[in-house]
Amino acid sequence: MNRLKITTTLLAVGVLLSGCMDASVPLSELEASDFTRTHQYMVKDTLQLDDRTDFDRATKGLIASDDSLIIHNADGEPIWNMDQYRFLQGPAPHTVNPSLWRQAKLNAIHGLFEVAPGLYQLRGYDLANMTVIKGERGWVIVDPLTTTETAARAMKMVNQQLGKRPVTAVIFTHSHADHFGGVDGVLADQDRDRVEVIAPAGFMKEATSENLLAGPAMVRRAGYQYGKTLTASPKGHVDLGLGKSVAMGSIGVEVPTREINKTGEVVEVDGVTLEFQMVPGSEAPAEFTFYLPQWNAFCGAELVSQTMHNIYTLRGAKVRDALQWSRYIDEARVRFAEAEIYFGSHHWPVWGQQSVQQFLTKQRDLYKFIHDQTLRFANQGYSADEIAERVRLPDGLKQTFSARGYYGTLKHNIRGVYQYYFGWYDANPAHLDPLPRSTVARRYVELAGGAQAMREKAQVALDLGEYRWAAELLNHLVFFDSSDQRSRQMLAQAYRQMGYQSESGPWRDVYLSGAQELIEGVKRDGPSMEKNMAEVLAKTPMVHFLDVWATRLDYEAAGDKRYQFVLGLTDKQQYYLLEVANGVMTYRQIAGSVPEGVPALVLTHSLFIDIATRRIELRSLLGHDELEVSGDVIDIVSFFRLFDNPEPGFAIIEP
């Protein structure tokens, strides 16, 4: 009997033998159920997990690695810790999907690597890679990680192992913070006026504005996606698929001295020739890849990765264009067909012209398949959920590790493509104006014959390993009565098993984070996004702040009254007239000084940033030398009271 038949038999036996989960076991110690164990065996049966090709690539060219890699911020708090992943040894435990376990071991390989003579990478010092290119006079740095602290530690390794040289240029491949935020750690001792900074067109706009309008909601959701409050362990956070984790230190940015605008543009910097390909709207709104003729090497940035990426990201973001993404990859495959090396902003390189072509072809076909099959079934009348349940990757992609869902997943990317074309409405009239979740929960509990009857049905589902159905029932019970501790415990158990089974690192983190909050509540520790990004926000255009401010207007508090207020920045000689009427705040820049009779707050830009990042409370500033108040202070206070402060720990798993 082959292994697949054996594991299928075990599943049937598990249905008969599995009893109720022991509610007395602490959630963090909950073991994998018989059904989860069977699921993990079946994963092992379907994949060649003993294939060592990627491990050989991930370790090739290792120059040096840190025995202990823990990086601290200025307050001595750890913001990056590779030591916590030392449990990634041997075969996968039953509490981790064996395919994710394999990816987690690969992403745990860290150090300084030689990709080719004169071309190096730091991997495992942050979520992303930092690439170091040897120029004629110094180092050309590509993607200087997320934080000042992690980038500085990476540069320390470079200087120790390769010899200290000045940084002559910095390249930002795209506008996500894990590829530019550590620039201050790279340029700490540099004469910045002598450093060329190269970025794609639109970089500063996207780098300073992305996620700002929806920042509080995205940060809260990202806490789930990245497992921010989970402990790294075989029963907790294991990997993100794209890398190990997200560093939470100081983030900066540098204004580009040169923007790349078109595909085919060739630039020489410090004796290094780069040919660029523009790929905006793929993985990032501002992004390029580039080719290094001296090495026959293609830097794919984040256009391609050693995993399926996100067409729709769970933290919430604008849906990406899967078809265009696929076209960009094909363009790169043809334009840089001579490439003998691929390296990227995440993961490990690929060597050999044929291997690089195969890698790019599979990545191209992955996004094209998701796009085309979603549209195929949508045009037959299937909903997003129905398509996600129906479509499976063909064997040519399914057996390719770089096409598997360690970060993005087939199911949620299908829903992303559907959303890109059709939005949230699936054309079913019952879904046009649905009842609120709490109301639906109450009605379903009543329909089931009460909370106890519904709990009993959920327990049967748990005992049969039907965790998705159990979660559906128990979610209604928690939204019906959030104080129902038994239902919370049962739902957490279901989420734990779903997390253990997940091949996607973010899916695992989402399930385990939800389970944790059901039992322990919301954890509100750590520095705020605003404080970590103070240097970025200082370079953010004022209009972005005003757009955010407008989204926080409490229209009910404003009522039918009309308000006016002037915000002035003395050092920038900028004045903005803000008006509230009809439930909206509008603004416009005005020339000159404050209009007569309009209350105003005039201050320096740096002081405004301190207020915006909550370093200083506005009420403590009255009488400050850099602050001038004109008009009635009561009017100013009344204006500020019209705006909400977002709740950083808003409810997700309960009403």
Image (cartoon, rainbow, N blue to C red):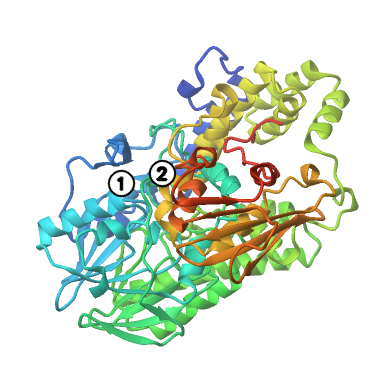
* Neighbours of disc 1 within 10 Å: few (<14), some (14-19), many (20+): many
The answer to whether mark 2 and mark 1 are in CB contact below 8 A is yes
| Residue situated in front as seen by the camera: 56 or 205 | 205
Q: Residue at x 54, y 38 (%)?
A: 619
Looking at the rendered structure, the number of numbered marks drawn on it comes to: 2
Counting residues from the start of the chain, the first of labels 2 and 1 encountered is 1
Q: Amino acid at mark 1?
A: Ala
Q: Nearer the viewer, residue 314 or 25?
A: 314
Q: Residues within 10 Å of mark 2 (few under 14, many from 20)?
A: many
Judged left or right of residue 637, residue 401 is: left
> In the image, which disc is placed on residue 108?
1
Residue 233 percent coordinates (x, y): 38, 32
Residue type highlighted by circle 2:
Asp
Residue 351 in view in this figure = yes
For residue 343, the mark is none
Given residues 71 and 108, the one toward you in this image is 71
Residue 239: which numbered mark, if any? 2
Which quadrant of the figure contains the C terminus? top right
Q: Measuring 45% from the left and 48% from the top, which residue is drawn there?
A: 610
* Secondary element type, mark 2: loop
Outermost residue toward the right? 429
Residue 406 seen anywhere in this rendered image of the structure = no
Residue 436, quarter of the rendered image: top right
Q: Residue at x 46, y 34 (%)?
A: 229
Q: Position of residue 1 (x, y in %)?
A: 49, 39
Instruction: Give coordinates of residue 27: x percent, y percent.
Output: 51, 22
Give the side of residue 515 with respect to residue 637, left or right: left
Give the CA distance from mark 2 to mark 1.
9 Å
Q: Secondary structure at mark 1?
A: loop
Point out residue 31 in the picture as x, y percentages from the top left corner.
48, 24
Name the residue at the top extreme: 24
